[in-house]
Structures are given as C-alpha cells and as structure tokens.
Amino acid sequence: MAETRVLPGSEIVVECLKEQGVKTVFGYPGGAILEIYDALYKHQNEIRHILTSHEQGAAHAADGYSRATGKVGVCLATSGPGATNLVTGIATAYMDSIPLIAITCNVGVTLLGKDSFQEIDILGITMPITKYNFIVKDVKNLAKTIRRAFQIAQSGRPGPVLIDITKNATIEKCEFTPEEPHRVERQKDTIREEDLEAAMELIQRSKKPFIFVGGGAILSGASEELRTLAHKIQAPVADSLMGKGAFDGTDALYTGMLGMHGTKASNFGVSECDLLIVAGARFSDRVTGNTAMFAKNAKVIHIDVDAAEINKNVHADVRIIGDLKTVLRKLNTRLDPIHHDEWIVHMERLKDMYPLRYDKSQLTGPYVIETIYDITKGNAVICTEVGQNQMWAAQYYKYSRPRQLLTSGGLGTMGYGLGASIGAKLAYEDMEKPDMPIFNIAGDGCFRMNMNEVATAARYGVPVIEVIINNQVLGMVRQWQTLFYGKRYAATMLNDSVDYCKLSEAMGAKAYRVVSREELRPVLEEAMKAQVPVVIDCQINCDDKVYPMVSPGNAIQDAFDDTDLKIRQ
C-alpha cells in the first residue's frame, strides 16, 4: 500500500511529476515559483531541469521533447512576465495538438486581484490557447489537479494544459498519497458501425482513391495501419506538413506534400481522384487552397478524433469520429485487396512529369537539405523554423518514420526550432538513443528570434546542429512581395553587419560559414562528429524561391513554378 506523507505543495508538484514518469523539465525561475525550484534542487537526481535562456525557449523545448517522444512535455515559469513569455510556445503546441503541461506560479491567494508585483491573470490570457487550464489556490487540490491535467493533455485530441499555482499553495502542507498514473484510453466509443459500412462502400466503388494524411496519424501511432490500407486498396498517398513521416516518404505510393507548396503530382492527384480518404487532417487553408475547388470530383471520407473538425472547412460525405489507429484497423480487417493499376500508372506519370526542381549550379536551400539527407542516410530528426527553410526541409528530406520532422505547422512560429531541437536531443538521451543526429533548419530571420538558446545548448553540451539558410532577407515574405506586391520589399531586408558565426562562438558553439556547394559536405561531416552544438551559416541568394506554389485564393491544381512563370511572361 502506498505510503501517505505530509508534504508541502512544492514537494507534491515534484512527486506528481515523478508519478507521471517525467524525466526532464524546462524552465526559468523567479520569485513566485522559488519553492518548486527548491524542491527540484532536492530531487535533481530524479528530474533533470534545463534552464533555458528565455521562457519561450522552455516552452518550445518542452514541445520538441513531446513531439520527439509522444510523451507530455513539461515547462515551468514564474508569475507575470515569466508566465506571459510562455504564451507563444503554448499557442504553438495548441495549434498542432501537442500534449504539454505548463506550470506557472502566481502571487499568494491574499494578493490576487490587487495588481501585486508580477501578478497576471494567466488563466484569462491562455484560455483560448489551452485545452484546459487551472488555478490552484489550496494545496489540498494540487495533486488531483496535476493528475487530471496530464490526463486531459493526452486524451482524445491532445493539447497543452496550464496549471497556475498560488505561492501559498506551494508552501502549505497536506497529506499526499502516491497513485499510479491514469491510463489514457483510445477514443473508440464514437466510432459507429454505420459510418464504417458507408466508408467501406465508397472505397469498394472507387476507381481513383487517394489518401491524405495529417498529423493525427502521428499522434495516434497509426503509421502501420495507414501503410496497410494504402497498399491494400492501391491508393496514392500525400501528406500535410504535420503528417510528414506518418507514411514512408520513400514508398512508391507516396506522391509528396499537398497544398500551397505541395508537389504538382499530389495537387493534381487530389484534384482528379474520385475518393479522398482523409486520415487525421484538419483541412488547413494552406492545404486546400480555394475550398470550393478542392477535390471537387471526389467523395470525401474524413476520419478524425475531434468531431469539431468534421465539415469545418471541407464537406465530408462519410465522417468517422474516433481514434485513427482503431478506425484503420477496423477497415483493414474488413477490406479485401483492391487493384487500381491504371490510376497508379497515371500517378507515376505525374510524378515523372513534375519532379521537384532547383538550380544545381550554386548553393541553395534544397541542396543543403538534400545533402543533409544524404549524409544522415535519412536517419535524423529534423526540426525547422518557419518560412522557406521549413518548406525546403519538408520537400527535400524524405521522412520514413513518424516524429522525424518537428515543426510549427498551425501557428507558424518563427524561433520555434532551436528550442525544439534542444528538447528533442534531450528526449533521445532520455530514450537512451544519444547518437540520434538532431538538426534545426533555420532562416536567418528565424535565427534572430531565439538565437540565445545557442547558449542553452552550449551550457548543457547538447550537440544539436543549427543550419542557417541565410539569404539576408525574410525569405518567404520577400517571395510574396516579389510575386504579388510589385517587388516592394518593405521591412524584409536583413543585410546588416551581424556575424552569426561570431555570435555563436561567443555563446559557446562551434561555427562554420559555407558559401559554396563544395564547402557544405565537409562541414556537415565535421558537425556530425562534434560533441558540442554547431552552427553552420549557409549563405544563399536572396531571390531563391520555394516552388511549386499556389497563389492565395486559387485552387491547388493551379500550382506553378519558375518555368510556368517564364511561360506566362
């Protein structure tokens, strides 16, 4: 029988984290949260605390830890500005359905509502960007709140949960009895037999089926079931940015990413198919383009754990609500193999006609990504920032397994990737896989956002490899300004005297500058051997663009590249 002890709230917090199997937390201390930090100091051999350079870095690191492992990431911050600095990281996790626990501390209960020093209503601020949030004013409610928060964060559609604890609740004492963590069950009770039957009928009648997979397939762990379905019904597969790796990017049925910067083969395939099976995706506007024209020739089967996503952006003819892995297993056991040879031949022809292309005469973003893929043999975890660097990383690295690409999809958070890469590297250490290479692909604009986390990586000796694709501009914004704003480059030029190599070295990292294709491979090989953080400044042309592209408001079948632009001109 578990031993009941009388503990202060700060110790209860740590005991609850240990209960949940938490090995690493990320944070930044301050006055209101000092009691918890004192407890963490006493338990430092059981829970590792990583002091980041900024609270936003702590939230991104916890997010990266979660994405890399599938477990709940944990970050901590003090009251006031400490808590508000977590907001962007919490919102990033919320948009991408990442299970995260953010623990903040507030002023004592007697000081609440009095504009006390560093008092802030963090519950009110984070209500729209959390799955749930709590304030604990009484130590007697602390343990059950933390346990419930972990359960909420992981159940159904995952997401971040915030726990705000008043100072007095960290000092006061009460009885604490250890408990086994609550087992989170897959959501099965919403899966209806009639919906499965309707889906079966559409699949069996289809002549040109297509599967579109999103991040839900990764969260559900449904990769094997997805592969089985695709090969059983001989359907080509495209993914969203968040779905990368859920279906093997080297599989013959894979056609590439779908949407604004998706492949022409995927965009044309979805536009021509007669059945679109959507597995754990939410039909982001960056995927659908003009929704009135999206998959207009197809019946749509939408499978998602969150009923709120059904018919939100695109009408579904059949809706199956529930855990994706469970749904696909049920479909696979009932389906006999179906052949669509002509359709597959047609899709292979599209892939041959419209491959991804780039200028191979100079150093470019795509060449950087392809070289990283070649050197790592496809076995690395790639984190990204947001913009052109992100799209090139999505297009040119072949992701063969889930949780291999960690990126801010829904919110598009510049400055996300470096903190996330630190979290991911430490996650692999906790999983006893310390040799897994972790890269963060950044633009120079993104690197400026949270480059102070290089100091965090150096402090703890975390050997992440930061690759800056440096075009001395805000690349994606400039691309839009070039194509749609008459080349009026308002506030997008970054051609100043900042030396990223010197900055990185000053923070404790090794640094290299690469200006040609020939220099890249030897530098990457050296970086892979280093046991310290490495920053590689790859300087490319400011007018390199991400293609294909779909103009805003257009249909995805209207994707164009530089060749199409030259023909139009």
Image (spheres, rainbow, N blue to C red):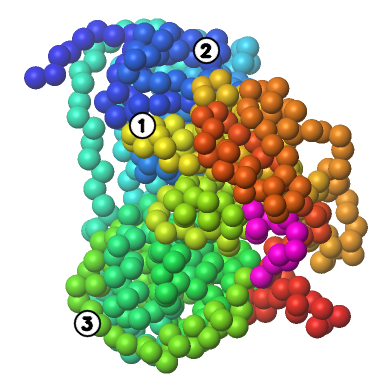
Residue 526 magenta: no
Image position, residue 523 (x, y; %) = 63, 42
| Front one among 148 and 339 | 339
Instruction: Give the number of the disc on residue 32.
Output: 2
Q: Secondary structure at mark 2?
A: helix
Determine crowd level at label 2: few under 14, some 14-19, many 20+ residues with C-alpha closer than 10 A.
many
Asked if the residue at tag 2 contacts the one at tag 1, i.e. Cβ–Cβ closer than 8 Å, the answer is no
Q: Residues within 10 Å of mark 3 (few under 14, many from 20)?
A: few
Q: Is residue 265 positioned above or below 479 on the image? A: below
Q: Earlier in the sequence, mark 1 or mark 2?
A: 2
Q: Which residue is mark 3?
A: 336
Residue found farthest to the left: 1
- In the rendered structure, find residue 430 and report the number of the disc placed on it: 1
Residue at 82% over, 78% down? 566
Residue at image location 33% in from the left, 34% down from the top = 432
Q: Quadrant of the C terminus?
A: bottom right
Labels 1, 3: front one: 1
Task: Name the residue type under label 2.
Answer: Ala
Query: What range of the chain is rendered magenta?
Result: 357-368
Q: Quadrant of the N terminus?
A: top left
Marks 1/2: CA distance? 29 Å
Work out whether residue 26 can be spotted.
yes
Q: Magenta stretch: dominant SS?
A: loop
Which of the two labelled residues, at mark 1 and mark 3, occupies the earlier sequence position?
A: 3
Element type at mark 1: helix
> Badge 1: how crowded within 10 Å, few (<14), some, or many (20+)?
some
Kind of residue sitting beneath label 3: Asp
Magenta run includes residue 366: yes
Residue 476 is situated, as x and y percent measured from the top left of the image, at: 74, 55
